Image: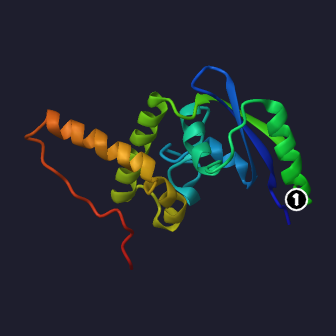
């Protein structure tokens, strides 16, 4: 049986234009490249979704996967941390690897993209486009408080610009069958 795990160093752009690094032991790391909303007729088992080269999806998913990690400002400290984690775990199928996403973790553009993606995922789930069997894989995205707060703020701004627009309240919890 495959462990499908490794110690992964995530390399992203910092606000000042340099690089920053996060280190974490992960399984199924390739899912950072998944676009949950892509129309994928070839794979009916998983419904919508597929691998993408869109780095805004990469950073969106990476934020969930590397949440809570220490941020290193140089690769040497990240390498040391990765080596320490690997020794603590003992065995990983893929050892230590680096993944580079040339996007900034905290830029306002990325936060706005995250909010739009979360909103689109919420709408897709509510409309039935996302398979309820996969609810748990979407739940952490839909309930990301930081993004939810930003989405709420943006919707309030839109509402003030369009005071005649009807307000739609939707329960995003899955229905019990």
Q: Position of residue 167 (x, y in %)?
A: 16, 50
The answer to whether residue 171 is above or below residue 53 is: below
How many numbered tags mark residues here? 1
Give the percent coordinates (x, y) of residue 95.
88, 48
Number of residues whose C-alpha sits closer than 10 Å to that of mark 1, classed few (under 14), some (14–19) or many (20 or more) = few
The quadrant where residue 109 appears: top left
Quadrant in the picture for residue 11: top right
Residue at the spot 34% in from the left edge and 51% down from the top edge:
123
Q: How far across and down, in percent of the image, does residue 158 sit? A: 22, 37
> Residue at (39%, 69%) from the top-left corner?
174
Q: Mark 1 sits on what residue?
A: 88
Where residue 117 sits, quadrant-wise, is top left
Residue found farthest to the bottom: 177
Q: Where 1 sits versus 155, above or below? A: below
Judged left or right of residue 157, residue 35 is right
The residue at the point 10 percent across, 39 percent down is 163
Locate the C terminus by quadrant: bottom left
- The local secondary structure at tag 1 comes to helix
From the viewer's perspective, is residue 177 above or below residue 42? Answer: below
- Please say whether residue 24 is visible from this viewpoint: yes
Which is nearer the eye, 20 or 158?
A: 20
């Amino acid at each position: 049986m495959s462990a499908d795990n490794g110690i992964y160093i995530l390399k992203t752009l910092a606000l000042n234009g340099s690089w920053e690094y996060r280190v974490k032991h992960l399984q199924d790391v390739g899912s950072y490249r998944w676009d949950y909303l892509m129309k994928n007729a070839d794979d009916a088992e998983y419904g919508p979704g597929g691998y993408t080269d869109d780095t805004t999806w990469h950073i969106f998913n990476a934020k969930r996967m590397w949440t809570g990690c220490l941020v290193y400002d140089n690769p040497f400290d990240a390498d040391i941390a990765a080596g320490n984690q690997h020794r603590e775990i003992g065995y990983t199928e893929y050892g230590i690897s680096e993944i580079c996403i040339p996007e900034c973790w905290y830029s306002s553009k990325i936060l706005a993209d995250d909010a739009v993606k979360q909103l689109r995922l919420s709408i897709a789930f509510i409309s039935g486009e996302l398979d309820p069997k996969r609810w748990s894989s979407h739940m952490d995205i839909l309930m990301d408080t930081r993004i939810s707060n930003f989405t709420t703020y943006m919707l309030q701004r839109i509402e003030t610009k369009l005071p005649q627009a009807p307000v739609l309240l939707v329960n995003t919890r899955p229905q019990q069958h």
